Image (spheres, rainbow, N blue to C red):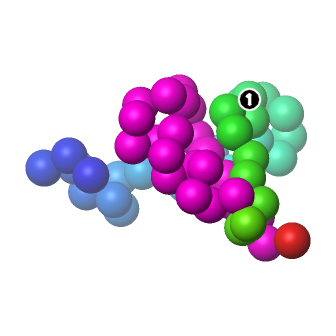
Amino acid sequence: MAPGFALSDVPLQDIADKVRHGRLDAAPSNVFTFDQIRDAHRLMENGETAGKMVVVLD
């Protein structure tokens, strides 16, 4: 979080509502299973991904 930018100022519920109703595209750039966590870290550390990454439990 950037200095001086309070988390409480982020309209999280508004963002979630827009995603739920299809008014905001929030698709992750990558989705990994928990078994692929090493691959996810490698990509992130090497700067080889753009956007949000998601790790799901299988």
**Which residue does the numbered mark 1 point to in the structure image?**
25
Image vertical order of residue 22 relative to residue 38, above or below:
above
In the image, 1 versus 30, the foreground residue is 30
Residues packed near mark 1 inside 10 Å, few (<14), some (14 to 19) or many (20 plus): few
Q: Is residue 45 left or right of residue 34?
A: left
Q: Is residue 52 magenta?
A: yes
Left or right: residue 54 versus residue 45 is right
Q: Is residue 36 above or below residue 14?
A: below
Is residue 23 visible in the rendered image? The answer is yes
Q: Residue at x 76, y 41 (%)?
A: 19
* Residue 11 visible from this viewpoint: no
Report the span colored magenta: 36-57
Quarter of the picture containing the C terminus is bottom right
Residue 43 locus on image (x, y percent): 52, 39
| Number of marks in the rendered image | 1
Task: Determine which quarter of the picture holds residue 36.
Answer: bottom right
Assign a secondary structure to mark 1.
Answer: loop
The amino acid type found where label 1 is placed reads: Asp
Name the residue rendered at 74%, 47% in the picture. Answer: 31
Residue at the (79%, 72%) spot, across then down: 57
Where is residue 11 drawn, in percent x and y? Answer: 50, 50
Examine the structure image and report whether residue 6 is included in the region drawn in magenta: no
Q: Residue furthest bottom?
A: 57
Q: Is residue 38 left or right of residue 31?
A: left
Residue 54 image position (x, y, % from top left): 67, 52
Picture coordinates of residue 21, whole percent (x, y): 85, 40
